[in-house]
Image (tube, rainbow, N blue to C red):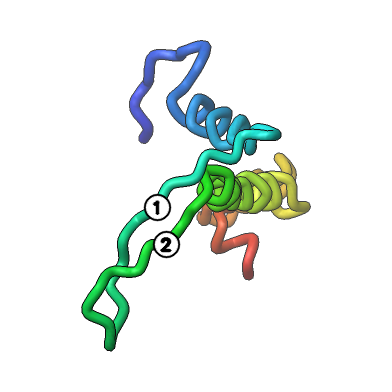
Amino acid sequence: MRQNRKKRFVSWVLLIEVMILVISPSPFFEYEFRIDQYVVGKSDPVPATYLISDWVLLFMFFRLYIILRSFFNHTEFSDPYAKLHCERHGFTANTRFCFK
């Protein structure tokens, strides 16, 4: 049985999800930086230019986690009626149950 946990107004999961949703590129902020990279066949390093907005857009793909999580939480197999039937028959309505 689950242990009683102290209820908090803000949980760590909520803070992480809010931080994921807050990430967005700022307009007109095009700070660039260069990293020297070595290429096979060349002895001198080649400078590669990156923009901060490119990295921010890369981190914005973590938003797909929010979409997938909400999909599993709001399917017809995760409503209280389905959970009641799952408890009656001795199994849990988790992510594997939604896929089945």
Image coords of residue 45 (percent x, y):
28, 69
What amino acid type is highlighted by mark number 1?
A: Arg
Q: Which residue is more in the foreground, 12 or 28? A: 28
Let me know if residue 65 appears in the view.
Answer: no
Please state which of residues 48 and 94 is positioned toward the viewer in this rendering. 48
Residue 24 point in image, percent of width and height: 63, 36
Image vertical order of residue 100 relative to residue 91, above or below: below
In the image, is 40 to the left or to the right of 75?
left
- Residue drawn where x is 71% and y is 40% of the image: 80
**Picture quadrant of residue 73:** top right
Q: From this viewpoint, which residue is outermost toward the right?
A: 76
Residue 25 image-quadrant placement: top right
Q: What element carries label 1?
A: strand
Circles 2 and 1, Cβ within 8 Å, touching? The answer is yes
Precedes in sequence: disc 2 or disc 1: 1
Relative side of 79 to 6, left or right:
right
Tell me what residue is drawn at x 68 percent, y 34 percent.
28
Residue at figure coordinates x 38%, y 62% from the top left: 47
User: Is 83 situated left or right of 39 in this image?
Assistant: right
Q: Determine which residue is flagged by label 2.
A: 48
Categorize mark 1 by other alpha carbons within 10 Å: few (<14), some (14-19), many (20+). few
Q: Name the residue under label 1.
A: 34
Amino acid type of the residue tagged 2 in the rendering: Ala
Q: Nearer the viewer, residue 25 or 17?
A: 25
Q: Residue at x 31, y 61 (%)?
A: 36
Of all residues, the one furthest to the front in this rendering is 44
